Amino acid sequence: MQTAEVQRHLEVLKQINDPEIPVLSILDLGMVREVIPLDEGGTLVKFTPTYSGCPATDLMRAQITAALTEAGFGPVQIEEQLFPPWTTAWISPEGREKLRAYGIAPPVEESADKNILFGESPQVPCPRCGSTNTRLISQFGSTACKALYACNDCLEPFDYFKCH
Ligand SMILES: [Zn+2]
């Protein structure tokens, strides 16, 4: 489905990182829904922000436009797709690995954790030692999209990327 030309566009886009989680690119986060090279020249990018109203969204749009233009793929049109809304389920397996390596526990999806269904905090495995013997310290970690947990086994605190 992805042509070599689309692939070249994606190579450019994967250099753009989320300002809030600098280890993840906008591709790792699944924010780029579709890249369409247009017959009349230029590129249409369908983009879903992680959080609507997030000030970082404008910055990312500007970075997409600048990066593709510089690579010779301009003019660039960006179509914001707000439906379906972004969910942590769109984070790629590679993105989840990068989060873990960075010391942030990747999101536990609802289907995998019945605690969430009962309104309790999800059971989050420690990104360092893998123990599920962890506890919630604060609903708000270093940014609004993260919660602060601590591991009862290795005693390290860690950020958890909350589900949406
Ligand atoms: Zn641990």
Image (spheres, rainbow, N blue to C red):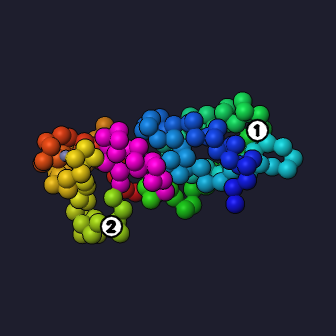
The kind of secondary structure element at disc 2 is: helix
Q: Position of residue 149 (x, y in %)?
A: 21, 46
Q: Position of residue 20 (x, y in %)?
A: 43, 37
Q: Amino acid at mark 2?
A: Ala
- In the image, which disc is placed on residue 134? none
Q: Which residue is mark 2?
A: 112
Relative to 72, residue 49 above or below? below
- In the image, which disc is placed on residue 73? 1
Q: How many marks?
A: 2
Q: Which residues are magenta?
A: 90-107
Is residue 71 within the magenta segment? no
Res 136 seen here: yes
Q: Position of residue 64 (x, y in %)?
A: 64, 38
Q: Amino acid at mark 1?
A: Phe
Q: Residue at x 77, y 34 (%)?
A: 72
Q: Residue at x 19, y 53 (%)?
A: 131
**Cα separation between marks 1 and 2:** 40 Å
Relative to 65, residue 3 above or below? below
Q: 10 Å neighbourhood of mark 1: few (<14), some, or many (≥20)?
A: many
Q: Position of residue 87 (x, y in %)?
A: 46, 57
Mark 1 CB within 8 Å of ligand 1: no
Left or right of 27: which side holds 117? left
Q: Quadrant of residue 117?
A: bottom left
Q: Residue at the right extreme?
A: 40
